[in-house]
Amino acid sequence: MPENLEPKKIEFKKIDGSSFGYFALVAILALLTAAGIAAYALDRMYHLSGLSNRVPWGVVNAGIPYFIGLSAGSLIVSALAGVFKIKRFKVFSRIAAFFAAAYIVAAISSIVFDIGKLYHFANAIVYFNPTSIFSWNAFFYSSYFVICALYLLAQFEEMERLTRFFACLAVFWAVLVHSGTGAIYSFMYSRELYHSALTPPMFIVCAITSGLGLLIATLYFTFKFTKRDLEIRLLRELGLIFAGLTAVLGYMLAVEGLEKGYIPAVAPATKFVYLNPYHGIFWSFWLLVIFGIIIPFLIVVYPRTGFDPRFLSLAGILHAAMVMAERFFLIVPGQVYPSEYLPGYEIESLHTLEGYIVSYTPTIFEWLQVIGLLSGAFLAFVVAAKLLPIIPEKAVVVEE
Amino acid sequence: MISRRRFLVLVGASAAMAMLPLQISAKSIGSEAKNEAKRRWAMVADIEKCTECMRELIKKTGNEEVKPPCVVACDRENNVPEFEEKEIDPQWMRIVKFKNKFGEEFYVPLLCNHCENPPCAQVCLTQATFKRSDGIVEVDMHRCIGCRYCMIACPYGSRSYNFKDPREGLREVNPKVPMRTKGVVEKCTFCVHRVDEAIANGREPEPACVEACRKYGKNSLVFGNVNDPNSGISRILKESIVIQLRPELGTDPHVYYLPKR
C-alpha cells in the first residue's frame, strides 16, 4: 500500500450531543429498547410468541447468532488496523470495537430473553456441562465481552503494543465464539436440516459480512450526523471486502443446499425448504439470496453505485437485515419439517403434532424483542459517543 | 550416511507399524460397551397388540384421537396437563399411526426412549437432564433454565416445554409426583417414583402405563431390567427381532417395538 494513504495522526474526539437531533435519536432508541423489554415481559407472562413444542426455537433465539455475528464481524474490522497493520483503518477501530462489545451484550440478552427460567441462569456456570456446546459458548460469550472491553480500554489509553495484543486475542476469540455458535446448531445430528460441518465456517463469513455491512452504514451516518469528514475511499475499501465475502457466503449456501438435495433421504425436506413458495421458509431463503447477496454485491461492484456512500450503506443495511433471514432459515426449517422415526414409514400423531409440517410465524412480540436489543446496542453507541472519545475528528486520506 | 541395509530395515519396520493398528481396530469393532450396572430399565411395546387396542377403541368411541388406557394413566399419574392448543400441550406418552406406501398401518405408543447415549443430556447446559446408573433419563426442574436445547437435540420429539403453568391444565393432582413449573422442560421418567418405591420394598416395578395396559387386558407393554437375564423383558429381547427408533444415530434407545407377525 502506498505510504501516502496513511493518515497523519488520528484525533478521537467526543461529540457535543447537545442538538435537538441528538436528543430525538436518544429518545427514539430508548423507546424501542423499552418496547423490546416490555414485549419480553408480556411474552413471559402470557405466552405471546409463536413458539410451540414442535418449534421451540424462534426469532428471539435467532437473535443469539445474529448479534454474535454482528459482534464478531465488527471486531474483525476493528482489528484490521491492529492485526494486519493496515493503519488507515485505525480511524474505525474504536467505533468497531465498541460495537463488538455492545452486540455481544445484545447476544447475551437474547439468551436471557429466550430462556424460560431466568433466575436459574447461574446454573449454567455452577453445573457446567463439558459435552454441551451451548455450555462452552456461555463461557466464550462472557469472556469475549471482557476481552472486547479490555481491547477498547487499551485503545483509549493509546497503548500501542497492548492494543495489538488484545486485537489478536480478540480476533482469535471472535472466531472461536462464532464457530462455537454455529456448532450449537450444526452439531445437532438428530435433525438432518441442521446437521452440517459447513455451518461454523459459514457463520464466520456471515459474521464478517453482516458486521461489516452494518458498520459501513453506521460509519456513513455517524460521520454525516456529526458533520465530520469521511473519505469515501476508506468506505469503498470496506465495501470491497464486504462484497467479496458476500459472494463467498452465496457460494457456501449453494454448496450446502445442493449437497442436501443430492441425498435421497433428505431430498423431500430440501425440496420443501427451497422450492415451496407456500411456506415462509422459502421466502426467508430466496429473499436472502436476492436482497441479501445478489443486490448488495451488484451495488458494490457496479461503478456508478459502488463509489457512492449512500448506496454502499444501502447495500450494507440490506445485507445485515437479510442475515436475520439467514438465521431464521438456519433455525426454523429443521424444526418445521417432521423427522422420520422409522425408515419407510410416515407418522401421524394422534395427540401431538409430530409427523405434520407445522407452521411457525413469529409474532410482533418476538420481533419487538429483537428490534429492542438492536436499538439497545445503538443507544449505547449514541450515548457513548458523547461520553467517550470513540469517533475520530476526521477520517481522511492524506495526499502528499 | 544411512546404509542401504539400515534403510530397508527402517522401511520394513514402519510398514509393519502402519499395519498393526489397522488389525487391532478391525478386531475391536463390534464390541459394544454394555451398561454394567445391576439394573438397566427398558420397555417393549407389542405393535400388534397396540394396533388391535387402538382399532377397537376408535371403533367404539368414533374418536380418531382417543386416548388409550396407557396414555390416560400416564397423564393422571404424572400430572401431565391437558391444554386445548395441541401446539403447546405437553404430552409424555402419545400414540402415533405409522403408515407405509403399501398401505400398511399400525399404532404405537411413543415415549422417552431413555437412550444409552442420550443427546438431551449431552447438550444440556446445566446437567439438568442426566442419566441415572439404571438408565433412566431424568430432568431436574430446579436446575433447568428452559433453554429448550434438549428439545432440539432429542431425535424422538419426546420433550415438552411448559409454555403455561401445568396447574392450569390439571383437574386433579397426584401428590407423589413433583409438580413442574412454567418455563421448564419435562418428559417421561419411566415413572421413576414407582420404580424407586418398588425397589425399596423389594417388588418388581411397574410404570403407570404398563399397569394400565395389563389391567385393560392387553399386556402389550412390558417393563423390566435388561441386565437381569431371567427377567420377562430379557426373554422377549433374546427370542425376538425388535425394532428401535432411529438406531442409526447411535443413541441406543431402550424402548423396543415388537413388529407385527
Image (cartoon, coloured by chain):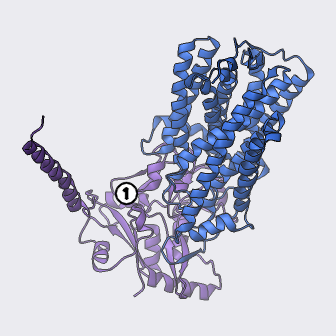
Chain colours: A blue, B purple
Q: Locate residue B225 relative to residue A326 in the image: left or right.
A: left
> Can residue B162 be spotted in the picture?
no
Q: Residue furthest left?
A: B5
Q: Locate residue B159 relative to residue A294 in the image: left or right.
A: left
> Can residue A124 be spotted in the picture?
yes
Residue A150 picture quarter? top right
Q: Locate residue B246 relative to residue A81 in the image: left or right.
A: left
Quadrant where the N terminus of chain B lies?
top left
The vertical placement of B57 against B228, above or below, is below
- What kind of element bears circle 1? helix
Looking at the picture, which amino acid does disc 1 mark?
Asp
Q: Position of residue A122 (x, y in %)?
A: 53, 35
Q: Which residue is mark 1?
A: B196
The vertical placement of A223 against B238, above or below, is above
Q: Residue at x 79, y 35 (%)?
A: A307
Q: Residue furthest right?
A: A20
Which of the pair B195/A29 is nearer the observer? A29
Quadrant where the C terminus of chain B lies?
bottom left
Q: Position of residue B30 (x, y in %)?
A: 26, 64
Q: Residue at x 32, y 80 (%)?
A: B240
Q: Residue at x 60, y 85 (%)?
A: B58
Specify the subunit that label 1 lies on: B
The vertical placement of B121 against A308, above or below, is below
Q: Position of residue B9 (x, y in %)?
A: 9, 47
Q: Position of residue A99 (x, y in %)?
A: 68, 29
Q: Residue at x 34, y 79 (%)?
A: B241
Residue B118 picture quarter? bottom left
Which of the pair B110/B20 is nearer the observer? B20
The vertical placement of A142 against A82, above or below, is below
Estimate how packed mark 1 is, as few (under 14), some (14 to 19) or many (20 or more) residues with alpha carbons within 10 Å.
few
